[in-house]
Image (cartoon, grey):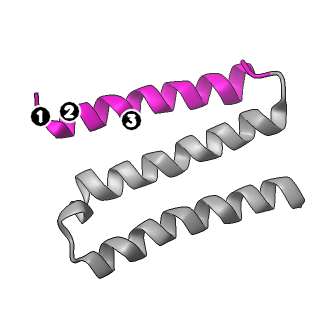
Amino acid sequence: MRASFVVWAALVVFTIASFALGGEHLIENKELAAAVVIGIGAIKVRLVGLHFMELRHAPIALRLVFEAYCVLIFGVLMGLYLFV
């Protein structure tokens, strides 16, 4: 089985999970549900970047910038959600 298929399947599962958490409120605590959905989004961005944009084979500097970008965006979104 190709790695791209496995990653695609994971993205589909993550999309369904975030829809279920965000739309159906499977978690009673809305802040926790939002944090999980934002986290799932960050994971999905990382998976797309590494596997479909082939950043896993990029020079280490570019990969570190991308990884830092994923962490930074997650932190900013969580900060905006929790504190604004």
Disc 2 crowd, CA 10 A, few/some/many (<14, 14-19, 20+): few
**Is residue 10 within the magenta segment?**
yes
Mark nearer the N terminus (1 vs 3): 1
Amino acid type of the residue that numbered disc 2 sits on in the rendered structure: Phe
- Packing grade of label 1 (10 A; few <14, some 14-19, many >=20) is few
Q: Is residue 7 left or right of residue 78?
A: left
Instruction: Tell me the quarter of the picture where residue 26 sits.
Output: top right
Task: Tell me the residue at 50%/63% (across/down).
Answer: 70
Residue 37 located left or right of residue 79: left
Number of numbered discs overlaid on the protein picture: 3
Q: Which residue is label 3 attached to?
A: 11
Apparent side of residue 53 relative to residue 35 in the rendered image (left or right): left
Q: Write down the residue under mark 2.
A: 5
Magenta span includes 34: no
Q: Position of residue 50 (x, y in %)?
A: 29, 56
Whether the residues at callouts 1 and 2 have beta carbons within 8 Å, the answer is: yes
**Badge 3 local density, few (<14 within 10 Å), some, or many (20+)?**
some
> What residue does disc 1 label?
2
Whether residues under marks 1 and 3 lie with C-beta atoms below 8 angstroms apart, the answer is no
